[in-house]
Amino acid sequence: MQHPRIAWAAAATLGLLAASFALPNADTTRAFPRASGADGERFSLEHWTLDASETRGRKVYETWCIGCHGEQGLGDGPSAEWLDPRPRNFQSGRFKFRSSPSGEFPLLDDVVHVISCGLNGSAMRSFPLMPEKEKHDVARYVLALAEFGMMEGEVNELIDDDGMSLQEVLDEEYEDIFLDNMELAWEDVWPVGMEQRPEMDEDSVERGKALYEAQCVACHGATGVGDGDSSFHLRDWKDAVVVPRDFTTGVFRAGSSAQDVFLRLRTGLNGTPMPAVSGSDDDLWDLTHYILSLAPSESDKSVHPMSCDAHGAAR
Amino acid sequence: MDRFGSIITAAGLGCFAFAFVLSSLYPWMITGGSKPETNIAVLAQDVSPEFRDLKARWPVAFDAAYPQGVDALTMQQLVGVSPDDARRGRSEAAWEASYAQALRDGRDSYISEGCWHCHSQYVRPVSNEDQRWGPVSVWEQDNNSLQRPMLWGTRRVGPDLTYEGGLRSNDWHAAHFWRPSEVSPGSVMPRYPWFFREGWQVRRRIDPEIAERTGLSGDTSYALPGVYDSQAEAEAALQSTRDSLPNSLAAESERLFVEQGKGLNHRGLSMLAYIQWLGTWMPEPEPEAES
Amino acid sequence: MSTVDMPFDDAPRAADSAETRADELVHKQLIKWHFSFGVAFLLTSMTAGFLVSLNFLNLYPFENIEWLNAGRMRFLHTNEVAYGFLVNCFVGALYYAIPRMTGKPVFSKKLGYLIFFVWQFLVLATSLGQLFGFAQALEWGETPTGFRPGSWDLEYIPVDFLIELGAVLVALQFLTPLARSIHKKMYVSQWYLTAGIIWLILTYVMGNTLPEWSMPGASGAATVGLFIHDLVGLFVTPMGWGLMYFFVPIILRTPVWSHALSVIGFWALAFFYPLNGVHHFLLSSIPMSVQYGAVISTMAVEIVVTTVIVNFFGTMWGKGYALRTNLPIRWFYTGMIFYFLTCLQCAFHTSLAMQKVIHFTDWVPGHAHLVMLGVFAFWIFGMITWLWPRITGNEWHNRRLNQWQYWLTLIGLLIMFIDLTAAGLVHGAMLDNLSPWMSMVEALKPYWGVRTFAGGLILTGQVLWSYNLWKTARTPKPYDYRVDLVQPEAS
C-alpha cells in the first residue's frame, strides 16, 4: 500500500457505516410505556411514548391542528361540528390521500404533502409557511396517533375482557402486541410505482372513456359531475355522507396534476366507497387522461394563485 | 401676504387645490378615470363555486336571505334536469342576481364591522409578500364598484385578504366566524355570533353496527343541510327526507331526528360570499394597440 | 412686526379697561361647555381604546354583544378623539383666543350655542351610528354618510352632510372676527386659524364624497390618503400651532422669537403638508410618480417643522425655569418635543426602505399616538389647565392631581410609543422573513400586553384630571391669577 492513510480512512469509514446500520432505527425504538398503577387504569394516549421528533410534532399539533382534529386526534375538535367533510380521525388509521397501497397507512411524505398544500375545497387549509422540520415532526406525530389507535383497542380488550390490569398487560403481552401491530402497520407501506406517463392523445382519452363507463359511472355520473345514480346516497366508514368528485371543475382535493389523479385511482381513498382501481398502469393513465379531459381549460379553472396546483409543486 | 383675503385665497384655497390636483386628480386620471369601473352586476356574472356551495350547505337561510335566488339550483337539484331545460337558464339568472345581492351585503358588513381596520387588501412588491399572499396588486384589479369606497386598509393585525377567495372553504370560514380562536388557536380576531341563526336541524345518528365496528360513539350524528326557524318546519323537513330515501337507505329513516342547531344567517352568508369573491376578479387585459 | 399687536394677557395691568374689554368679548360659558364635553369624549374614547387593546389579549369583555364588538369599538376610539375631543377643545380655545386677538366678538353667541348643541348631537350620532353598523369606510372619517356604502339609499342620519353644515357655521362664527380684526396686520396665529378653518371644510367635503361616490380602488386610496393627512396637517396642526403662537407668548409674557421663521413655517406647512397624502399607501398600485412626490414632500415637511420648533425654543430663551414652575408651559413644550420627534419619524419612515418593514405594523399606531396624544392632546391639556381656573373663576381643587396627570400620561405614552415601535419592527421583520402568521401573533402578544398597561396609565391620568376639573368647577374658591404668572424662581 503506497498510501496507508487512505486505506485507514477507508476502513474507518466502512466501519462507521456498518456500525450505523447496526444501530436501531429510530422509528422502531418506541420506549415501552409504564402504568401508573391506579385502579381501573386503561391504556390511553398518555401512556403512548413519543420520540423526540414526535414530541416536537405534538407541540406543533397543539398549536395548529387541535381546533379541528381535537386533542387526541379523533377529529372531534371544538370546530369539527361545523365542518363537512369532517376532520380526519387520525386514530382510525384511515387516510384518504396516499401513495401507499390501498388500505395501508400513508407514507410520511403523503402526510407532509397534505399539510403543505391543504385539501382543496375542504376545511383543511394549507400551511405553506410552516418550516419543513415542523411539518415533518407533526406528520410523525399524526402517524404516531394512528399507531396508537391500532394498539389501544387490543390492549384495552385484554383489560376489559380478560380482567388483566394495565400493568400486567404491559409486563406480559404488550411487547408482542406492539411488534405485531407495528409490523402489520408498516410492512406493506411503500410507494406504489407508476410507469412513465404516456402522451395524452385522443386515443388514450377514448380508451379511458371506455374504462370510465365500465367502472365509474355509477357514482361519478355519465358526464363526470358526480351525479351518478348512487352519488347522493354514499356513506363513508363512519357513516357520514360522502359526495363523489365533480370532474368538470378540474380541481381535486389533494392535487390536480395527472400524477395526483393517477395515485387516487391506483390507491383508492381509504375509508370511502372509492376503491383502488385495478388495471395496468397504461389503463390507469388512460382513465386519468379521460378524467383530465373533462376539466375546463387552465384559464377557466378556479385555481387559487397560492395553491400547490398553481405552483405545480409542493410548497 | 399677511392679509385676511390673501391667506384665504393663497393658503386656504390655493395650496389645497394644488395638492388635490397632484395627489388625487392626477392618480385618478391615469388609473380609474381612464377606464370606467366595473359594476357589481357585471362582477356577479362569474358566480363562484363557493357561493353555490353556500346554498347546498345552508339552503333555508339562503332562500330567506336572497329571494331572487330561490330558482337557483344546486348540483343535487340539477340531477336529471336536461341540458336544454328552461329551469337551467332561470337557475343561472337567479344565481347571478343573488350573488350580486350577496356581494353587496357582504361588502357592507365588511365595512360596518370594521374588518378593514385589521385586514389589508393589497399586496406590495416587497417583503416577500408575493410569496405569502399572491401576485403583487395592480390598480386594474381594484377598478370595480366593490372597491368603492376602497377597502385597502392600513394595518395587518390579521392576514391580507387580497386573494382570500377560494383559499379556504366555506365551512372553515363558518367555524372561524363562530369562534376564531378555536380554528386558529391564539387568534385575536373577535367572534361574530350575530352572523349565525339559532334554529332546528335534522340530524342523522350513525348506524349502531358501524359504531360498534369502528369504536365510534353511538351518539355520533351528522346534521343535514338547512337550519329551520321552528321545530315544526324541521319535523316537516325530516318527513320529506324520509320520503325521499331510496330503498337501499331505508334503515336510515329511523335514525333521523330533530335537534336545535345553528347555521349562518343573511349576514353570515353575504360575508362569506364577499370573502370568497376577493381576488377572484381581474379585468380582461386590453388588446395591445397596433402601432 | 405684528408681534407688537399681540395682546398680553393677565399682565399686572389686568385691571385696566383694555383688559376688561377683552375679557368681555369672551363667552366663558361656551368655553366651559365645549371643554367639558371634549374631556368627556376623551374619556369615552380612551376607554374604548383600552377595551380594544384588551381584545388583543383575548380578554375582551363584550365579545358576544354585537354593538359593543371590538371592531366597532375601534371606530369610537379614533372618531371620538378627532371629532369629540379635539374639535370641541379647539373650538373652546378659539372662543377664548380669537376675540382677544382680534378685539372683536365672535359672530353670535346664539350661533355659538347652536353650534355647540348641533356638534354634540353629531358626535353622538357618529358614535351610535358606528356602534350600530353605519360606519363609513374612510379611515379617521368613519362618520356615517347615512347612505348605504357607495350608493344613495339613505338608511341613517347623514352625519357627513350635517358636519359640513356645522363646519360652515364654525367658519362663519370665527372668520367674522378674524376678518374684522381691529389690528391692521394679522398675527401668525390668525393665519393658521383662518386657513385651518377653510381647510377643514374643503378636506371634509373631499374625503367624504370622492372615494365614496366616484373614485374606486387606487384613485380612491390616493384621495383617502390625502384626506387622512389633510385632516391632521391642515386642520389639527394649524389649530394647534395657531393656539400655541397665542398661548405660549402670553404665558411666558414675551413676543415670539422670530417673525420671519413663523412666516416660513406657515407657508411651508400650507405648501408641503397636503402633498404628503399618498404616503399612507406607499408601495401600492397608486402610480409610483405620485408616491415619490409624497415621499419627497414628507421629507420637506421636517425642514419646516424644525423652523417652528427653533422659533418656540427661541421664544423660551432665558425662561427655561417655566418648564418646572408652570404646568401649561411644560405640557406645551413636551408636546413640541414630541412634535419634532413624530415629524422626524415621518421623514425617515416614509422612505420606501423603511416602509417595507414598518407599514401594516404596530409602528404606525405608535406614531399616531405620539402625534395625536403626545402633541395635540398635550397642548389641549396645557390650554385647559391654564384656562380652567380663569373661565370658572375657581382655584384648582387639587393642583397635585394635575401633576399626576402629567406624569402618568407622559410615562404611559412613552411606554406605549417605545413598545409599539418595537412591536412594529418585530412584526415587520416577521412578515418579511415569512414566519407563519400565528407565530407572529404570538410573538406580538407580550407587546400588546405592555400597550394595555401603558393605556391604563394614560386613562388613569385623565380620570384623575377630569375629577379635578369637575371638583374645581363645582367648588367656589377664589382664584388669584398671580399664582400662575411665570417669574424667575427665588434662588
Image (cartoon, coloured by chain):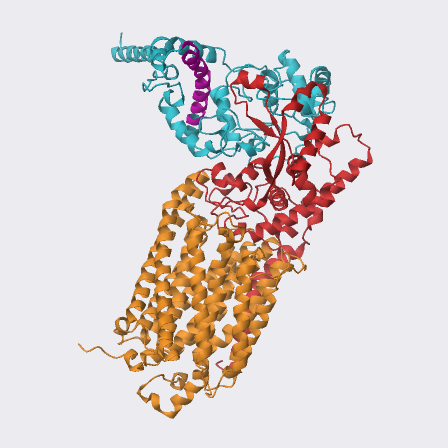
Chain colours: A cyan, B red, C orange
Residue C216 at least partly seen: yes
How many marks are shown on the rendered structure?
A: 0
Q: Is A28 on the left-hand or right-hand side of A201? A: left
Query: Which residue is pictured at 35% across the width and 60% down the height?
Result: C460
Quadrant of residue B58 in the image?
A: top right
Rendered location of residue B120, percent (x, y): 52, 48
Query: Residue A149 magenta-drawn?
Result: yes
> Most extreme residue toward the bottom, as rendered?
C17
Say which of C117 and A178 sits in front: C117
The stretch of residues the image draws in magenta is A137-162
Rendered location of residue A141, percent (x, y): 42, 24
Say which of C35 and A310 sits in front: C35
Query: Which residue is pictured at 56% across the width and 34% down the height?
Result: A82
Q: Main secondary structure of the magenta part?
A: helix
Query: Which residue is pictured at 47% across the width and 13% down the height?
Result: A185
Q: Is residue A294 above or below residue B164?
A: above
Quadrant of residue B78 in the image?
A: top right
Residue C268 at least partly seen: no
Rendered location of residue C429, percent (x, y): 41, 44
Say which of B169 and A158 sits in front: A158
> Most extreme residue toward the left, as rendered?
C491
Rendered location of residue C366, percent (x, y): 40, 55
Query: Residue C252 magenta-drawn?
Result: no
